[in-house]
Image (cartoon, coloured by chain):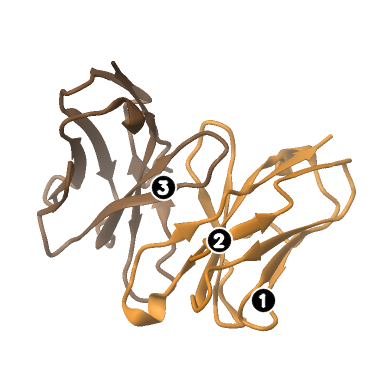
Chain colours: A orange, B brown
Amino acid sequence: GAGVSQTPSNKVTEKGKYVELRCDPISGHTALYWYRQSLGQGPEFLIYFQGTGAADDSGLPNDRFFAVRPEGSVSTLKIQRTERGDSAVYLCASSPLDRGVHEQFFGPGTRLTVL
Amino acid sequence: DQQVKQNSPSLSVQEGRISILNCDYTNSMFDYFLWYKKYPAEGPTFLISISSIKDKNEDGRFTVFLNKSAKHLSLHIVPSQPGDSAVYFCAASVQGGSEKLVFGKGTKLTVNP
């Protein structure tokens, strides 16, 4: 079946602008995660959704970052007033956590560049 | 403060030989461990996992060993193939709750023909 998809694959924006990054998880996966990967680092957790609710947002760096998953499927990560330090690859992952599966399946990521 | 550490940024092996990638962790609450492989411009791909109730898990050419007392795990690839060349990430989580993954910085494996 189809894997996790993310759009856009690349996003270039200017400092101070607003951006939205989209994630389509694997169908039927109730758990959805956002991670951020900076150059030379491993992915870092941002936020976790179980269904429609954000069950753990402890990884969001500040209040410029927000994410939604209104219907329990597609999720959007929103970044306000972007800064150059926000440049990274933003990864989305999904998992059928409610079925006792602990592995997460990742999308290809969105590379965000803030000029 | 890194909770999951991969101290070797790179590793080079000959085709057909064994590749051993190492990972250490500091958080004793971690009870589930995963290895992911990542090619350039792609997302991480799940490879193999192990629960803390086990000390070994095998899947084809890939075996993961867990030493809980040393807080150390390793991934063995035998025999190594050129297509295995990628960045390998070790990750850990606590089962129950969000199960968010904590990743190491990765080890770049190069398998030479």
Any mark on residue B103, and which?
3
Question: Can you identify the residue that label 1 sits on?
Answer: A69
Q: Amino acid at mark 2?
A: Val
Question: Can you identify the residue that label 2 sits on?
Answer: A4
Quarter of the image for residue B85 reads: top left
Mark closer to the observer (3, 1): 1
* Cα–Cα gap, marks 1 and 2: 15 Å
Sequence order check, earlier mark of 1 and 2: 2
In the rendered image, residue A27, in percent from the top left (x then y), is placed at 53, 75
Image side of residue A30 versus residue B103, left or right: right
Label 3 chain ID: B
Residue at 28% over, 55% down? B33
10 Å neighbourhood of mark 3: few (<14), some, or many (≥20)? many
Q: Amino acid at mark 1?
A: Arg
* Cα–Cα gap, marks 3 and 2: 20 Å
Dot 2: what SS?
loop
Q: Amino acid at mark 3?
A: Phe
In the rendered image, residue A32, in percent from the top left (x then y), is placed at 54, 69
Label 1 chain ID: A
Q: Nearer the viewer, residue B100 or A61?
A: B100
In the rendered image, residue A113, in percent from the top left (x then y), is placed at 76, 38
10 Å neighbourhood of mark 2: few (<14), some, or many (≥20)? many
